[in-house]
């Protein structure tokens, strides 16, 4: 296969990130936007050693599940992969993906028993961070990077982010022009505005705007802030974050509070949490509440239980579980997250929770633990941590996973000592290939 060559093929499956897979003459082509069982003319964009990447030149036969995307730039923006697919079929794909991994990798016959979808899968994201820049006509734009590039796809009305954030971005674009504030140029390493980060509270009428700038000096700052607040009184805090580094990391170390308290608040399962610009807080509050309530139910907690919340982050699961148990210990290796967790406990007057900055595998050794909650990053559980679990043998484990592949790998080891009683999925990110899986394990008798 050569670059720009056009071939006809049928989509047989999806990659882990939702691209269509086409096989022609024993060669594999990844095609964004192509749905399973669709036939298309495909133009080869480039080839690697073991695969090619193509684009749809012409659709010949369409999937019965294909729909008109609500988003006007869904084919070029890198934020979603399934805007063109019926929501029910997205769920079927995710369920089948998890089931296949459980059978092939974990070597168990357990299947997804419950999939918790969104009633309305739009406008759910409470955090966005978008770059500002210029198009080829040197017009000021903002949006999301095209997949695997630093080309900004202009998107005025993202259909998965909070509507308040979309309106604020439109205003900021106008104000940057009115106040002659230039966007950052990555090549020249000049300009002022690099990114804008917006966080919105789901339950409380609070909005945070973070202006990520290339320089400290903010000309006409007071008038700019005054005008922004006048147009959007729903904004409760504005922060300037200074990032002078030539890096893909969005936030810098230095911050200045320009307006308000420097944080917003939101609720999860009736508990209140402070959220700063750098705090970890789930981006889909509606589904997170369903996820955490399910985790509590799977744990079947009682007032005598000693609970360990591993990879606890800012302490959300442990704090929510605290009212059902004797005590909770949250363990997390990130110091800033532990500070947030301690503050969250104080904010909610919870006294039976203790947060420790330590590696979970070291803390678990020889501890009297009844129930463990684990919510690790995509790489799953550390092997030494699994060894500590198998040595300590807590009665119950609730495993929350953002990557079914590493979950299945870990379950293949844990199943020797634990019965896997319940497999559930929660759709935290509609229109993506991402799926959150939650599993209940009980010590074998």
Image (spheres, grey):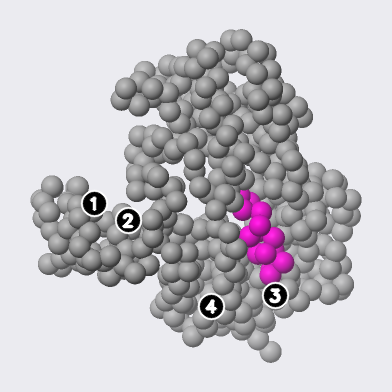
Q: Which mark is residue 298?
A: 3
Q: Which residues are magenta?
A: 282-295
Q: Are marks 1 and 2 in contact (CB under 8 Å)?
A: yes
Q: Which residue lies under the disc numbered 4? A: 112
Please say if 283 is above or below 18: above
365 horizontally vs 113: left or right: right
The answer to which of marks 3 and 2 sits earlier in the sequence is 2
The answer to which of marks 1 and 2 sits earlier in the sequence is 2
**Gap in Å between the C-alphas at discs 1 and 2?**
8 Å
What number of labels is visible?
A: 4
**Gap in Å between the C-alphas at discs 4 and 3?**
14 Å
Nearest to the eye among marks 1 and 4: give it: 1
Q: Which residue lies under the disc numbered 1? A: 55
| Residue in the picture at 52% in, 22% down | 174
**Gap in Å between the C-alphas at discs 3 and 2?**
37 Å
| Residue in the picture at 55% in, 58% down | 121
Measuring from the top left, give residue 229's x and y in whole percent: 69, 24
Few, some or many residues within 10 Å of mark 2 (<14, 14–19, 20+): many
The answer to which of marks 2 and 4 sits earlier in the sequence is 2
Choose top left, top right, bottom left or bottom right for residue 41.
bottom left
Few, some or many residues within 10 Å of mark 1 (<14, 14–19, 20+): many
Q: Which residue lies under the disc numbered 2? A: 33
Few, some or many residues within 10 Å of mark 3 (<14, 14–19, 20+): many
Q: What secondary structure prevails in the magenta region?
A: helix
The answer to which of marks 1 and 4 sits earlier in the sequence is 1
């Amino acid at each position: 296969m050569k670059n720009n060559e056009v071939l006809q093929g049928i989509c047989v499956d999806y990659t882990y990130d939702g691209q269509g897979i086409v096989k022609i003459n024993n060669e594999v082509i990844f095609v964004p936007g192509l749905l399973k069982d669709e036939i298309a003319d495909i133009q080869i964009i480039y080839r690697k050693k073991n695969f090619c990447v193509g684009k749809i030149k012409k659709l010949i036969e369409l999937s019965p599940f294909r729909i008109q995307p609500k988003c006007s730039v869904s084919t070029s923006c890198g934020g979603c992969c399934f805007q063109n697919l019926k929501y029910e079929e997205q769920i079927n794909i995710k369920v089948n993906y998890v089931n296949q991994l459980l059978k092939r990798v974990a070597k168990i016959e357990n299947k997804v028993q419950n999939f918790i979808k969104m009633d309305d899968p739009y406008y759910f994201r409470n955090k966005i961070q978008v770059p500002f820049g210029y198009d080829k006509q040197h017009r000021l734009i903002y949006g999301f990077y095209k997949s695997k590039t630093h080309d900004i796809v202009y998107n005025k009305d993202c259909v998965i982010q909070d509507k308040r954030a979309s309106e604020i971005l439109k205003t900021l674009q106008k104000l940057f022009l009115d106040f002659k504030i230039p966007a950052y140029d990555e090549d020249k390493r000049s300009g002022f505005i690099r990114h804008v980060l917006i966080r919105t509270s789901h339950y409380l009428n609070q909005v945070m705007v973070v202006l990520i700038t290339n320089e400290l000096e903010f000309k006409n700052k007071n008038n700019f802030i005054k005008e922004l607040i006048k147009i959007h009184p729903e904004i409760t805090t504005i922060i300037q974050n200074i990032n002078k580094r030539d890096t893909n990391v969005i936030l810098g170390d230095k911050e200045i509070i320009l307006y308000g308290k420097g944080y917003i608040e939101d609720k999860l399962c009736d508990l209140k949490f402070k959220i700063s610009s750098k705090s970890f807080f789930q981006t889909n509050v509606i589904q997170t509440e369903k996820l955490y309530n399910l985790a509590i139910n799977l744990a079947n907690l009682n007032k005598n239980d000693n609970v360990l919340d591993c990879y606890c982050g800012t302490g959300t699961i442990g704090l929510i579980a605290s009212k059902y148990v004797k005590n909770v210990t949250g363990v997390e290796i990130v110091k800033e997250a532990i500070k947030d967790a301690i503050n969250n406990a104080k904010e909610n007057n919870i006294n039976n929770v203790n947060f420790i900055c330590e590696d979970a595998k070291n803390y678990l050794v020889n501890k009297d633990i009844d129930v463990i909650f684990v919510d690790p990053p995509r790489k799953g559980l550390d092997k030494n941590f699994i060894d500590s679990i198998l040595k300590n043998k807590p009665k119950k484990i609730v495993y929350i996973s953002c990557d079914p592949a590493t979950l299945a790998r870990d379950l293949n080891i844990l199943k020797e000592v634990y019965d896997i009683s319940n497999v559930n999925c929660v759709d935290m990110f509609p229109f993506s290939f991402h799926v959150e899986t939650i599993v209940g394990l009980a010590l074998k008798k």
